Image (cartoon, rainbow, N blue to C red):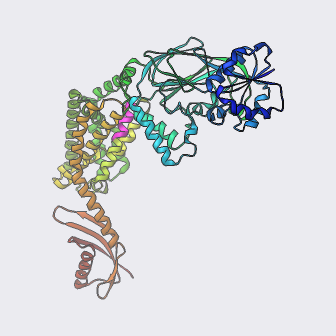
Amino acid sequence: MIYYIYADDRETFIEEAKPLFNEKNIIYLPFSKLGEMPIEEVSQLLVTGCLNEIKLLMGIAHQNNLHLGIIPALEQKELIKTFDLPSKQEDAVKQALEISEKKIDLLYCNGEIVLQEVVVGDAPPLDRFDSTLKGKSFWDRIKIFWRTLKRVKSLKHTQMKIIDAKENEINLSAVGVVGIEYANDTFASKLISSQLNATDGKLSIVILSPISIIQYMGYLFKTLVSHLTPKTLPKSVGYMRSSKITIEPKEPMDVLIDSAKKQLTPVELYVEEKALSLGVGEKFWERQGKESSSKDSIKIDHLPSDEESANYLSQSIPLFSHASKAQYASLFTNLREESRLSSTFMTLLVLATMIATFGLFINSGSVIIGAMLLAPLMQPIVSLSMGVLRQDNALLLNGLKTITIGVSAVLFTAGMIALFTPIEQLTSEMAGRLSPTILDLFVAIVSGAAAAYAKSNEKIAGSLAGVAIAVALVPPIAVAGVGLGWMNWHMFSTAFLLFITNLVGIVLAAALTFTILGFSPLHIAKKGVMIWMVIVAVVTIPLYSSFTKMKEDIEVQKTLSNLAFNVGEHDVKLTHIELFHRPKTDEIRCEVISTGMLKKEEKIRLKEAILKSIHKEAEVIVTFRYRL
């Protein structure tokens, strides 16, 4: 005998469905009279009702080994999608009557059947259905992103103990957990869709545990705005799979079972394998993970588990991540050691200076690069940035002392070499370090960020060599030292400005990077960062002036390049334009290709034409070439 159990308020729906059963022997019974159903006479159950009523019938069908068919109401969209139920009433009736040969698992939470998901704590957007984005425009998704992001202020980590079926105990900190059994198009199930199978006797939990707002924003943006499912688990999300999982939070947490609020912590989730014969659609089976395995799995190594992090995150989620005590201790041990002046540091620095200075004289870029690799000056600068960030006077003073003595040694060594070398010729390698601009500051800032990041991660510490080459600390000081040896104060000041640019850019960028990596709370970092921002702003003034000059020089070169005109009896053309800024006046050097030797009057006209073209006064030095 087939019993059709329906919600008391669905009589109209049932009257519309009756003709679709083709005069089958169906007994219709409202839920209010469910106790009158003679279960021993029932061969099959049909149901229409709310989720709780459907789950009640699922429990009865499970206990009595009966087939259950669900005939959903049109508004039950999530239920329809989860089990691939037809939305058209006629098709829904037909599918509900078909006896399924396959049985599905049933997920229980503290003894209650879970159809869609169980949410412990707060886990946006993992607890939402992907259908919320269906048909939404880009700007609508942006609005959903911001609304979800605003909830981050109320998210707080809670320490919890999670125990799997094998009694393995895991301690971690998280803001929420989502338990699921079927691929149901929630954001949680989409992350682990390949692991979900309705017949393997396993349930899955997805754990939301962001350690910073920046990290959480990345996942939210990718999910809600770009509408892409990450191919790998985001850094803020963990995952467990087992036949039984117990979640015991340190503090009481709200629990939602199929969007209905319960107060059930601690929570015990378990699966009854292949427990129910349920009429589902073909797409339901197609969505099941192809790699069904009886093994438990876990991916939580990247989630915070130590008590220090848990206590820190229980207050609120910070803007930037918080480094653990172990990370902090390891980095500070290295930085304190590297901030101290030592004989090894001085020996390497003097040798690197000698190599760099000789490389400048012989105009060899490869020799200068070798000096960059050898020079250890980056180490105390990174240490100084951490001292600035943490307001650590010992680290700050040691770093400043080492840098000051080291720079003085470089200037003295390069000056002595220049003084006793019988060559006083400005090479292109030297000239290239005499016009620092704001672009050099940008290079220093990026290099400082790279240096701090590499220093904080032992696995990529070898990348510091590349950073040293990019920022080139010793060569500009060596050029300044050569300027001292030649008593050329313009050369000294411009080259030393390049070093100062590199220094302040690295210190500021490294401090900001260490802040982002969680090595200092913002209220401590703020003072030091603000001071160095002011220093960078002051250094930017001459750099911007140099940048403006560089732009003007480029315009001059464009104007004069291949400029051709007649100066009298001969035609001339300008090539190979070079500009030099001297203390008293600018200097333009170029080649003049002429049809013949110019007279004095023609040379005067040539100079006047050049200066008129660039609208400025300058010394003009030309090399003549004659077209035969």
In the rendered image, residue 450 lying in the magenta stretch gets the answer yes
**Residue 370 shows in the view:** no
Nearest to the observer: residue 96 or residue 341: 96
Q: What residue lies at 54% left-to-right and 33% top-to-bottom?
A: 128
Name the residue furthest bottom. Answer: 569
- The front one of 556 and 265 is 265
Provide the residue span drawn in magenta.
448-456
Q: Give percent across and percent down for residue 173.
A: 44, 21
Residue 508 placement: quadrant? top left
Q: Position of residue 108 (x, y in %)?
A: 61, 18
- Quarter of the figure with residue 566: bottom left
Queried whether the magenta region covers residue 258, the answer comes back as no
Q: Is residue 549 above or below residue 266?
A: below
Which is the main secondary structure of the residues drawn in magenta? Answer: helix
Please say if 328 is above or below 480: above
Image vertical order of residue 598 relative to residue 506, above or below: below
Residue 136 percent location from the top left of the image: 54, 46
Q: Residue at x 37, y 33 (%)?
A: 320
Residue at 59% in and 12% down:
166
Residue at horizontal 30%, vertical 83%? 597
| Residue 160 rendering spot, x and y as whole percentages | 46, 17
Which picture quadrant has residue 309? top left
Q: Is residue 389 above or below residue 358?
A: above
Front-most of residues 340 and 214: 214
